[in-house]
Structures are given as structure tokens and as C-alpha cells.
Image (cartoon, rainbow, N blue to C red):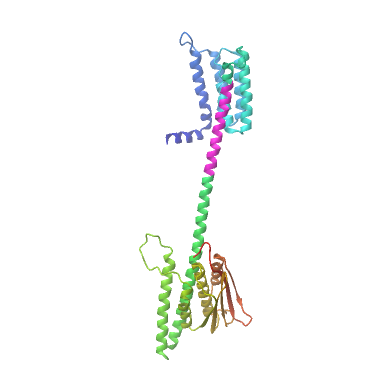
Amino acid sequence: MQVTAMRRWAARHDRIRDASPAVVLIVVAVAAAAAGNSGWHAPRAAGVAWTALSCVPLAFRSRWPLPVVVLTMAVELTAMALVPDRVSTPAASLVALYTLATRSGRRTAWTVGVIAAVAITAVYATTHQEPLLVGTSLLRFDFAIAATALGDAVRSRRLHLARVEARAERAERTREEEARRRVAEERVRIARDLHDVVAHHITLVNAQAGVAHHLMRTDPDRAYEALAHIKETSRAALDELRATVGLLRQPDDAPDSRAPLPGLADLDALIGGIRAGGLSVTVTRTGLPRPVAPATELTAYRIIQESLTNTHKHARAAHADVFLDYGAATLRVTIGDDGRGHTPKGPGTGHGLIGMRERATAIGGTLTAGRTPDGGFRVVAELPLSLTPAIA
């Protein structure tokens, strides 16, 4: 925690951070200039002055790394030539080379580093009258190369960490976007389910209530039968609502009624409720009926349910036909009526047809709907028999 706080403080005070090595180098230069064979003495002013002068550009090393290298090298090479008996390790130039390597491209850093290493070695060997390839001269060369290599390694590590952080942030954004997309898809799917359940059953209840109201005085027995149908329809609506809302429960929620989602096995009960509401419906199955994917069953059921609800609610129809044709790879569902093109008998939102198309498309199928030449309305859905993966 303290290290992190110090780094944040240094990031906010870059000039102080840049100058801190200069302070250390000057203190070391004073101590080195005051040491001698016979013990401590007054520091040699010339050596300390040249060291301090070479350290001045370091205060700007982060902003202008290459000019700082040039300035520190010029001062220290001049000091080597004029004051050969001073401490001759070009420390300020090494700091500048390290900074350049951390803040510039690899080619620039190594080009400048090699040139600086050769220049330092040559000037030192000349001013100290030593062979160019002896250990003392080569040590200055090694220092310059080591400073450049260390800076290059630090720069590479920073780039690697930056890439890792960028990938982590990108992955996090991708996860969030995927989560939002899935939530949006689930909301749309649940909205379709609720629309289908509520619209269908409320339409039937309304129709059956109208029949009961009309027959209450003239035919009490049929009115009582209509009221019984209202009871059954409302119970079925509650069961389907519980099943739909139950999808939102968490595993640790209290148990409740979770009726399975309807499928083609429940088609007879659906048709029975429609017939009780006053609409004659005929169901025809062709091909070889066989088990289909749960998502296809639910989609086919909802499309039939919504289509018959629309027929009962919006079309002045007396009869509707439902065809289920089992093909080699698809289930073709056709719902037609003899009405007047779904002339509205009540207000509608248009969400029913949109929802049916979305259901069919979601599992890889298609849906078309429109008026027929004889004035009725037909809905045709082509749904795959098997899904990978299954979508419910």
C-alpha cells in the first residue's frame, strides 16, 4: 500500500521524481570527492561541480529524454577531458540512457546507447592513457550497455503489463455487453410469453363472459357452462403465468407451482378453450408426427395460440383451420380462417405478429402472414424439428 501511494505521489510530481536521481548522484559525488588514501578531507570542488552540472538536465529526463542524453554526455565527456582525476564513471549519462530506453523505441534506444558507450570508452581511454580494450575502459562500455538494456527491459515489461490490462478491460467489456445482450433477449422472450398468455386467455374469458351474460336469462344451463369455461380458462392462465414467471426465480427461492411450459401435447386443451369461446376450429396433422425439439414445440404452440387469439379477437370468422405438416427436417404450421382479413373488433398493438416472427426467427425458422384471396387470414410458419443448441 505504501509503495502504491508513493508511486501515485511521484506520478503527480514528475519534476521531483526526475530530479531525485540527481540528488543521490550529487551526494555520492561529494562523498567520493572527500575520500582519499589518508582519510577524509575537504571535497574536491571541481569534481563535485562537474557532477552537479551534469545532473541538472536530469530534472527534464522524462519530458525530453534524447536531449537530456546529449547534454549529460557532453558535460561528462568534457569533464573527463578537463578533469581526468575526478570520479570518471558517467553516472548522469547512465541515468539518462536508462530513461531514454524506457521512453523511446528500441531502435532509437540501442542506437544512442551503443554510440554513447563507444564515446565514453574512447574518451576515458584517451584521457587516462589506457588501452581501449582493457578492463577499466571496457567497464565504462559495459555500464552504458547495461543501462540501455535495463531500460529496454523495463519498457518491455510496461508494454506487456499494459497489453494484459487492455485485454482484461476488453474481456470485461465483452462480458458486460454479452450479459446485457442476454438480459435484453430474455426480457423480449418473457414479454412475448406474457403477451401470448395474457392476450389468449383474457380474450377467451371476455368471449365466454359475453356468452354467459347473453344467456343468463334465456338459457341458464348454457350460461352456467360458459361460467365453468371461464373458471377453467382463468386457471390455465394462472398456471402458465406461474410457469413463465417461475423462469425468473433463483435456485434458492421458495418452491412454488412450476407447471411445465406448454407444447404440442397441450394443443387439444388449447383448441377446446377456443371452441368454448365460440370459434369452430379444425386440426389436421399430416406427415409422420414425431418428437420435436422443446423450443420448436413451444414456438409452434405459441404461434397457434396467438393466431387463433387474433382470429377470435380481430376477425369476424366462424371457422379456423390448423395444419401441422411434419416434413423431413421442418414442421410446417398453418393457421387460416374464413374471416374478413382481421378487421379489428377491438384495439390492438401489432405486437402479436411481431412476437410470432421473433419466436420463429429465434429458433432458425420463418413466418409469413397475410390475407388470403377469399378474404380470410393465414399464418404460415416453417420451424426446424431439431435445434443445436435448443432454445426455449
Q: Was residue 6 drawn as part of the magenta stretch in this picture?
A: no
Residue 132 vertical placement versus 201 (above, below): above
Residue 145 vertical placement versus 350 (above, below): above
Q: Position of residue 98 (x, y in %)?
A: 56, 28
Position of residue 170 in the picture relative to residue 254 (left or right): right
Q: Residue furthest left?
A: 254
**Nearer to us in this view, 189 or 135:** 135
Q: Position of residue 388 (x, y in %)?
A: 53, 62
Majority secondary structure of magenta residues:
helix
The answer to whether residue 141 is seen in the rendering is yes
**Nearer to us in this view, 390 or 302:** 390
- The residue sitting at 43% across, 88% down in the picture is 215
Q: Was residue 156 drawn as part of the magenta stretch in this picture?
A: yes
Q: Residue furthest bottom?
A: 218
Magenta segment range? Answer: 141-166
**Nearer to us in this view, 25 or 13:** 25
Q: Position of residue 72 (x, y in %)?
A: 59, 23
- Looking at the rendering, which quadrant does residue 124 occupy? top right
